[in-house]
Amino acid sequence: MSGTVIARRTFCQLTAGSVWLGGMPAGVRAQDDAESTFTFGVIADAQYCDAETTGSRFYRRSLDKLAACVDDLNEHDPTFVIHLGDFIDRDFSSFDAILPIYSRLKSPRYHALGNHDFSVAADKKGEVAAKLGLKDRYYSFHVHGWRFVVLDGNDVSLISRGPDEPEYSLAQSSLAELKAAKAPNAQNWNGGLSPRQLAWLDRQLSEADDAGERVVVFCHFPVYPSNAHNLWNDTEVVRVLESHPCVAAYMSGHNHAGLYAQQNGIHYVTFRGMVETKDTTAYALVQVQADQLRIQGRGRVTSRVLDLRK
């Protein structure tokens, strides 16, 4: 895999001062029955704002698409639903228009944070996670013997962090290194995981290995295969994932065209963005079974069966 990783030597400056983040919303149906079959919903890049259409992005139409999506998901009663980031395109006030629609879901609701979620006024960036109902910017939860890990790909970022934060200066140096290496993901709208979050991820996966759990990792940003939308330290994240047999899949958004690849027993699924096109939606129901994940796509999302026997 190509792509320069965020240098460990610069990452180390954040380790001591970072705050541990973790947790889960109240009401999730958590059990330890590994034999249970259940379903969860996945939505990516609703990216709503009250703005004119730009190219293939119909920002205002996302309200109607999400409303129809919520009605459909409520009919199927998934165990939980997650939105994989870029809930809005810009402006903090956009949350007030789209959140009430998402709140109509009967199932427990989760978010991964996207880069556009932080395209708000500087004094509002620190309020984004709480506005989405998140206690923590990255966290994990358990359902029927599975562990679901939600990462914050904006941990090291030029968009979610202010110039006075150490993560901002690290983002500057990391992006400069990537540009010097002509890496495809050397884009200022991407981000990376801090060393503290990487260490937390490694611990989560080690605990899952020891407990005999399977794991699905969620993040706004993809990590494989190499492309312009990947996390800045995609290679390092993949190395951590592949060092743990518990990992079944990594699911992301950000690349609105969608993508799928498999490597070393892990399925990497990038879901197509809901904001794209005037009338065609994009979301999925994922049925979890002991030996496979069955993605039942809606609209532009491709249906596929992910074999978990490895």
Image (cartoon, grey):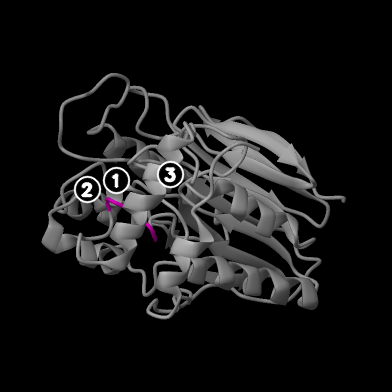
Q: Nearer the viewer, residue 194 or 32?
A: 194
Residue appearing at x 45%, y 75% in the figure: 15
Q: Amino acid at mark 3?
A: Glu
Q: Secondary structure at mark 2?
A: loop
Residue appearing at x 12%, y 63% in the figure: 123
Provide residue 152's location: percent of width, then percent of height.
44, 60
Residue appearing at x 43%, y 36% in the figure: 180
Q: Nearer the viewer, residue 71 or 184?
A: 184
Which of discs 3 and 2 lies nearer the camera? The answer is 3
Label number found at residue 177: 3
Which of discs 3 and 1 lies nearer the camera? The answer is 3
Please give left or right for residue 296 compared with residue 19 in the image. right
Picture layout, residue 77 above or below residue 13: above
Q: Main secondary structure of the magenta part?
A: loop
Residue extending farthest to the top is: 55
Contact check, label 3 and label 2, Cβ < 8 Å: no
Q: Amino acid at mark 1?
A: His
Label number found at residue 119: 2
Residue appearing at x 68%, y 62% in the figure: 215
Provide residue 150's location: percent of width, then percent of height.
51, 62
Contact check, label 2 and label 1, Cβ < 8 Å: yes
Provide residue 176's location: percent of width, then percent of height.
37, 43
Q: CA distance from mark 3 to mark 2?
A: 24 Å
Which corner quadrant of the image does residue 14 belong to?
A: bottom left
Q: Is 32 colored magenta in this rendering?
A: no
Label number found at residue 116: 1
- Classify 10 Å Cα crowding around label 2: few (below 14), some (14-19), many (20 and above): some
Residues rendered magenta in the picture: 155-159
**Is residue 64 visible in this depiction of the protein?**
yes
- Classify 10 Å Cα crowding around label 3: few (below 14), some (14-19), many (20 and above): some
Q: CA distance from mark 3 to mark 1?
A: 23 Å
